[in-house]
Image (cartoon, rainbow, N blue to C red):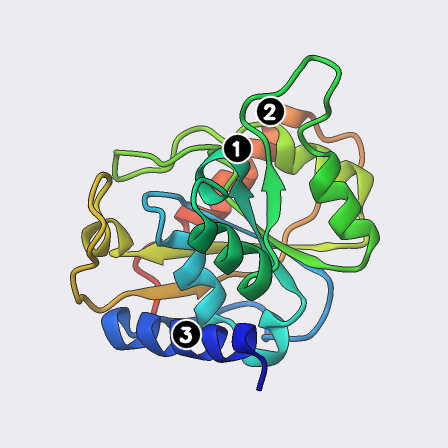
Amino acid sequence: MKLADAAASFLVFLARLITGAQGHWHGCPPKAEQRIYFANHQSHFDWVLLWAALPKDLRATTRPIAALDYWTASPLKHWITREVFNAVYVSRQRTDAEDPLEPLMQALRNGDSLLIFPEGTRGHGADPAQFKSGLYHLALEFPQVELIPAWISNVQRVMPKGEVIPVPLLCCVTFGAPISLQQGEAKAAFLQRARDAVMALRGVD
């Protein structure tokens, strides 16, 4: 077994040991189809939990989005995100000429699925912040890719902002029915509908 594969198995085991990392599927089955999973965001642990909640065959083709400056700041974080999670790096310090969505679009062109957080940054309230426009543009450019909302529960208590040691606590990820961009649908209306789809999964088990 390659070192990266062993590390992936260990991280999945650790995430499930600490949190349970339970995945509940409502409205869609866990199928090996190209998808964009989008969820609420309150912790650095979010995408680890979301990734660990997927079946193994889906994890192999599903790539989380990672902030380039943070997740390449040390050799260990860089190796884990690159070799274990096959993350798509997004720069938060870019020039006007750079398209921040280009790395995501390239991954979708390659047939990968994505884990994204449309809020763009970790929230502090019980409700997700308003979604940024990235999800809308991805839906517009890749209408064939399923958009799967997800709600991550309790993870902000497992890894509060500023903490580095997780606190054991049962968490779960609830996946909902796919949504799609409707013909002629305005950006603001779509983003509100996508946010509502995520929030509708809160408390569903």
Q: CA distance from mark 3 to mark 2?
A: 36 Å
Residue at (44%, 38%) from the top-left corner?
A: 70
Furthest toward the front, the residue is 75
Q: CA distance from mark 3 to mark 1?
A: 32 Å
Label 3 sits on residue: 12
- Dot 2 falls on a residue whose secondary structure is helix
Label annotation for residue 90:
none
Label 1 sits on residue: 192
Earlier residue among tags 3 and 1: 3
- Dot 3 falls on a residue whose secondary structure is helix
Q: Is residue 57 left or right of residue 198?
A: right
Label annotation for residue 188:
2
Q: Is residue 47 above or below residue 68?
A: below
Given residues 56 and 139, the one toward you in this image is 56
Q: Residues within 10 Å of mark 2 (few under 14, many from 20)?
A: some
Locate the N terminus and report the quarter of the image it occupies.
Answer: bottom right
**Amino acid at the residue labelled 2:** Ala
Q: Is residue 199 left or right of residue 79?
A: left
